[in-house]
Structures are given as C-alpha cells and as structure tokens.
C-alpha cells in the first residue's frame, strides 16, 4: 500500500530534523579538528593527539576528520547522505570504543564522558544510512527516484 502524501511529508520532515542538528554538530566538531575553529586544536595537534594518546594512525585520523567535517556538510545538505551518515557512524563507533567506553554510559556520570552522547549521534547517523536524506535533500534532486 502506498503512503499517503501526508505520511511522506512527515517522513521527509523527520529526516530533515535529524539531518540539520547532526550536520551542524559534525561540521563544528570537524572544524575543531581541521581548522582549529570553535576552540579546537587544529589539524597538526589532532594528528599528534590521535596517534600518541589513542594509537590511531594518521591515515585513520584523516579519514575521521573527513567523515566529521565532510560528512557533516553532506548530512546537512542531504548530499551523499547515506555515505556521509556511514562516515559519521563509523567515527562514533570508534570514538565510543577508543575513548568513551571506559567511562561508562552516562555523559555526566561518575567518571564523566561516557558513551551516551556518542550513542545518540550514532543512532541518528544510522537512521540516515538506512533511510537516506528524504525529499528535502540534494540527493533527491541529483538521483531522482
């Protein structure tokens, strides 16, 4: 059975309501790592910290920065939404494992900085991987379906 027009509008609005905050969050976080914006450390320091403290090789650090900044732009605009969402989801999975897991679940728990926030972002990104960008996305205009 086909969806009603109202149902399709609601679905696309829901996807837009996921895309806008997720894209903004990752553009900001990617800008910290790439450009040193918003109080971030910038590219050189990001490479050093990821390698020395987390044991992440430079190529994977570069991929994480691309996934955050480029994925944030892609998700916000709905451009290559599934790929952008996958990059963000992958980055969040690694962040949960390498940084936040040892701190427990809660962001403000006894040890602080747990997986709670990353898990929410991971879920948002995975929703876009499976659903795409919706009607109000660049993808819809480029890949008319």
Image: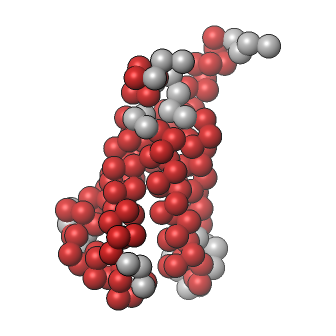
Q: Answer with left or right where residue 123 lies relative to residue 92.
A: right
The structure residue drawn at horizontal position 38% and vertical position 48%, both measured from the top left corner, is 72
Q: Is residue 24 visible?
A: no
Q: Which residue is at the far front?
A: 59
In the displayed structure, 74 sits above or below 32; it is above
Q: Residue furthest right?
A: 1
The quadrant in which residue 46 appears is bottom left
Residue occupying the far bottom of the picture = 52
Say left or right for 130 vs 89. right
- Can you give x and y, in whole percent of width and height, for residue 106 in the image? 61, 73
Q: Residue at x 55, y 41 (%)?
A: 128
Where's residue 77, x and y in %? Answer: 37, 35
x, y percent for residue 141: 41, 20
Which quarter shows the N terminus?
Answer: top right
Residue 104 in which image quadrant: bottom right
Residue 125 versus residue 34 in the image, above or below:
above
Count numbered badges in the picture.
0
Towards the viewer: 18 or 34? 34
Name the quadrant containing residue 145: top right
Q: Residue 94's x, y, as percent?
A: 52, 70
| Residue closer to the observer: 142 or 108 | 142
Task: Classify 55 as above or below 121.
Answer: below
Q: How is the protein colored in the picture?
A: secondary structure
Q: Residue at x 64, y 74 (%)?
A: 105
Which residue is drawn at the image coordinates 59% and 62% (left, top)? 119
Q: Is residue 35 left or right of residue 60?
A: left
Q: Is residue 7 visible from the viewing direction of this image?
A: yes
């Amino acid at each position: 059975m086909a969806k009603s027009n109202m149902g399709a509008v609601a679905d696309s609005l829901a996807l837009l309501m996921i895309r806008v905050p997720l894209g903004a969050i990752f553009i900001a976080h990617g800008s910290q790592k790439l450009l040193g914006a918003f109080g971030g450390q910038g590219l050189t320091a990001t490479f050093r910290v990821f390698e020395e403290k987390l044991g992440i090789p430079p190529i994977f650090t570069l991929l994480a920065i691309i996934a955050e900044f480029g994925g944030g732009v892609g998700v916000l605009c709905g451009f290559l939404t599934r790929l952008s969402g996958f990059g963000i989801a992958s980055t969040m999975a690694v962040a949960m494992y390498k940084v936040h897991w040892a701190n427990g679940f809660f962001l403000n728990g006894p040890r602080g900085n747990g997986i709670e926030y990353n898990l929410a972002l991971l879920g948002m990104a995975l929703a876009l991987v499976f659903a795409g960008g919706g009607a109000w996305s660049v993808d819809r205009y480029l890949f008319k379906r």
